[in-house]
Image: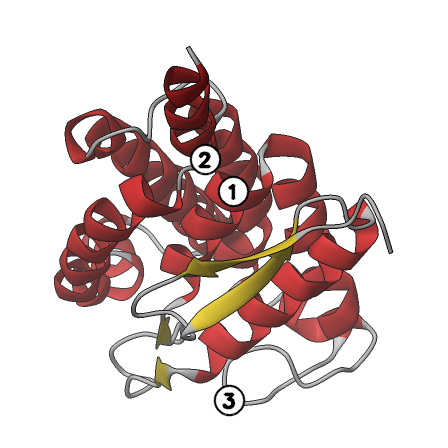
Amino acid sequence: MSGISIRMASLGTMSGSVIRAVAAPRWLLVLAASGILALSAQISLHLPPSVSPVPITLQSLAVVMIGVMLGARAGAMAVIAYLLEGAAGAPVFAGAAGGAHHLIGPTAGYLWAFVPAAFAAGFLAERGWTSSWRRALPMVIIVKAIIFAGGLLWLSLLGMRGEALLAAGLFPFLPGAVAKFIAALVIIPSCDPQARHRELEHEKA
């Protein structure tokens, strides 16, 4: 067991504490993160069909944190693992749903956009964008924009246009997006592994 160290990382409003194995196999962290994403999908609010076919969930917050904690590649891999689990029928999508049809349905654009969003969060975190809430602010905006862009693009391909597109794919999610935005800015600096590494290096100097 030598060479393996375990530390607890607080994820605040997400799911309590998540065990991060610093030297654990990368696939183990990827699978754990896909499980967190699945749990965040179950905290959901399904809107009336006349309003939007897309539920409100905590997944965008989870995607940001997964990218920050695991980095660009592993973060994106965790989301891909989550999508494959759902496509295989595991009840990991909102409302404990599963099945490949969700990856071509109304929510597909948001789901697929989680992959580049997690990659972007990790990529920017690796470059020090998460050391404070001021630096994290543009990062979270970028990640949110990627998710909304993917969702809106897909809905437009399904035939929605103009005001109907925005009414179904953007406006209902703005209040929740603001709340998750603020939560991310509070949580991210304390969960930034690069910031902790810089702190340790400073203590050694």
Q: Which residue is at 47% across, 40% downward? A: 68
Local SS, label 2: helix
| Relative to 190, residue 50 above or below | below
Can you say which quadrant of the picture contains the N terminus? bottom right
Res 106 visible: no
How far, Cα to Cα, is label 2 from label 1?
Answer: 5 Å
- Residue 143: quarter of image: top left
- Per the image, the residue denoted by label 2 is 121
Q: Quadrant of residue 14?
A: bottom left
In this rendering, is residue 191 above or below 47?
A: above
Q: Looking at the image, is mark 2 or mark 3 nearer the viewer?
A: 2
SS label for mark 3: loop
Mark 1 / mark 3, whichever is N-terminal: 1
Q: Are marks 2 and 1 in contact (CB under 8 Å)?
A: yes
- As helix, strand or loop, the secondary structure at mark 1 comes to helix
Residue at image point 45% right, 35% down: 121
Give the amino acid type for the residue marked by disc 2 in the picture: Ala
Label whose residue precedes the other's in the sequence (2 or 1): 1
Q: Which residue is mark 3?
A: 95
Do the residues bearing badges 1 and 3 touch, measured as CB atoms within 8 Å? no
Q: Badge 1 local density, few (<14 within 10 Å), some, or many (20+)?
A: many
Q: What residue is pinned by disc 1?
A: 67
